[in-house]
Image (cartoon, rainbow, N blue to C red):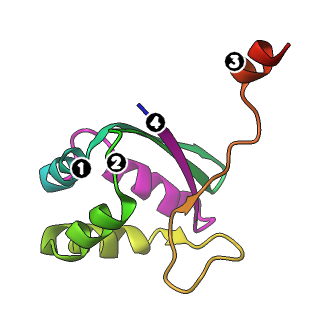
């Protein structure tokens, strides 16, 4: 299964960062959000943080479509409410287009591919 990585920043405020993390705890995350993730063909997802920088990794089905996920999210009022809430904690990465949040990262190194090439 393909794995995708995205980056996004949080506002550099310890209280806001703690609140963002609280919202992502198993007890706090909305079930509709988990359902929308699974329905899109995302099999696993993790968010990691260092300072105010987030990195999201997703293991997705072969047919996963970011465009289809975005369209489904735009049509789902509960997902839109979640996105509005999360936007209060998030800030775009430098160089982001207006309204752009999570930005797809480019892989620059693979140990397994490098070993195969030797």
Pointers 2 and 3 in contact (C-beta within 8 Å):
no
Q: Where in the figure is residue 76, as x and y percent of width and height?
A: 15, 71
Q: Dot 3 lies on which element? A: helix
- Tag 4 near tag 1, CB within 8 Å: no
Q: Answer whether labels 2 and 1 touch (C-beta < 8 Å).
A: yes
Number of other residues with Cα within 10 Å of mark 2, as a class: few under 14, some 14 to 19, many 20 or more: few
- Spatial CA distance of label 4 from label 2 is 23 Å
The structure residue drawn at horizontal position 72% and vertical position 22%, both measured from the top left corner, is 113
Asked if 110 appears above or below 82 in the picture, the reply is above
- Tell me the residue that label 2 is attached to: 24
Query: Alpha-carbon distance for marks 2 and 3?
Result: 32 Å
Quadrant housing residue 87: bottom left
Q: Does 13 lie within the magenta span?
A: yes
Where 41 falls versus 1 (above or below)? below
State the extent of the magenta-drawn residues as a range: 2-30
Write the residue at 26% across / 67% down.
Answer: 82
User: Which mark lies nearer to you, 4 or 1?
Assistant: 4
Q: Is residue 71 above or below residue 2?
A: below
Decide if residue 58 is on the left or right side of residue 92. left
Residue under pointer 4: 2
Q: Which mark is residue 112?
A: 3
| Disc number placed over residue 40 in the picture, else none | none
x then y, percent, for residue 13: 59, 64
């Amino acid at each position: 299964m393909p794995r995708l990585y995205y980056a996004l920043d949080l506002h550099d405020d310890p209280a806001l960062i703690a609140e963002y993390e609280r919202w992502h705890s198993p007890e706090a995350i909305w079930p509709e959000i988990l359902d929308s993730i699974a329905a899109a063909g995302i099999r696993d997802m993790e968010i990691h943080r260092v300072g105010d920088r987030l990195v999201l990794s997703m293991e997705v089905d072969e047919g996963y479509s970011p465009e289809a996920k975005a369209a489904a999210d735009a049509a789902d009022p509960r997902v839109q409410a979640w996105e509005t809430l999360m936007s209060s904690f998030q800030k775009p990465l430098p160089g982001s287009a207006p309204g752009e949040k999570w930005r797809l990262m480019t892989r620059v190194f693979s140990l397994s591919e490098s070993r195969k090439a030797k």
